[in-house]
Image: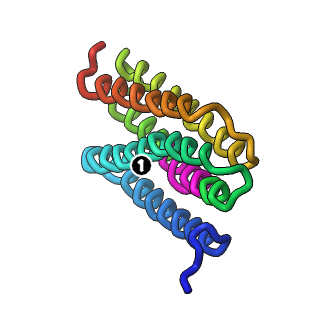
């Protein structure tokens, strides 16, 4: 018989794999930051984009989980499963990806742009807003896990649009650099 994926054992294994991947990822980043900046730049930028994509995937998926969780009866095994999914998404993917996005983004902002440019300041403000959205989702996930179903599914559908709008603004700021 296969082990239930929401069990403690499966959760510990998933956490160990996530921690191992994070350590390897950070080790690669440290090595890259200590080589010739010209050679490191495209690699650090690529790793930054990978971290951002991972973070955005979580930001776009979490509200959908809240909608499904809202439909699950409080205290049911289905509600417990959603709580496990939300916690793992936040702790194993979203927060590590957010931290790596910030670390590498700030590194690039300093080494390449010296924090100069209105577009960069606007981008940082939008990324800060994404960080607040991330932490709002984390608080909501903890509340759902306790059986405090916050807001309606319609609210979470609307909240799903905020990371999308911020992502569009960030991409335009980075690619077009309008000011």
- Position of the N terminus by quadrant: bottom right
Quadrant housing residue 141: top right
Is residue 118 rendered to the left or right of residue 70? Answer: left
Give the residue at x 47% y 33%: 160
- Position of the C terminus by quadrant: top left
Q: Is residue 154 above or below residue 22?
A: above
Q: Position of residue 73 (x, y in %)?
A: 68, 50
Q: Give the camera-side residue of 135 and 150.
A: 150
- Answer few, some or many: residues within 10 Å of disc 1's Cα (few below 14, many 20 plus, some between 14 and 19): some
Is residue 13 rendered to the left or right of residue 32? Answer: right
Quadrant housing residue 178: top left
Q: Is residue 104 above or below residue 27?
A: above
Quadrant housing residue 131: top right
Q: Is residue 150 magenta?
A: no
Q: Majority secondary structure of the magenta segment?
A: helix
Q: Give the camera-side residue of 117 and 100.
A: 100
Is residue 41 rendered to the left or right of residue 83? Answer: left
Q: Give the number of marks.
A: 1
Give the residue at x 42% y 27%: 166
Q: Position of residue 168 (x, y in %)?
A: 34, 27
Is residue 159 rendered to the left or right of residue 112? Answer: right
Give the residue at x 42% y 37%: 105
Residue occupied by mark 1: 54
Label 1 SS: helix
- Numbered range of the magenta stretch: 85-98
Q: Position of residue 87 (x, y in %)?
A: 62, 53
**Most extreme residue toward the bottom, as rendered?**
1
Give the residue at x 67% y 71%: 8
Q: Position of residue 130 (x, y in %)?
A: 50, 31
Q: Is residue 45 above or below residue 109?
A: below
């Amino acid at each position: 018989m296969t082990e239930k994926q929401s069990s403690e054992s499966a959760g510990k294994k998933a956490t160990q794999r996530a921690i191992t991947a994070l350590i390897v990822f950070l080790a690669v980043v440290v090595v890259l930051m200590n080589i010739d900046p010209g050679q490191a730049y495209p690699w650090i930028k690529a790793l930054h984009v990978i971290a951002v994509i991972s973070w955005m995937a979580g930001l776009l998926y979490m509200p959908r989980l809240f909608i499904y969780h809202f439909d699950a009866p409080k205290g049911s095994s289905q509600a417990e499963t959603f709580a496990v999914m939300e916690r793992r998404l936040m702790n194993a993917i979203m927060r590590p990806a957010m931290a790596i996005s910030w670390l590498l983004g700030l590194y690039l902002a300093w080494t390449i742009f010296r924090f100069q440019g209105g577009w960069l300041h606007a981008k940082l403000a939008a990324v800060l807003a994404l960080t607040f959205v991330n932490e709002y989702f984390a608080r909501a996930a903890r509340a759902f896990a306790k059986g405090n179903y916050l807001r309606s599914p319609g609210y979470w559908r609307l909240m799903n649009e905020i990371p999308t709008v911020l992502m569009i603004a960030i991409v335009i700021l980075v690619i077009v650099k309008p000011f």
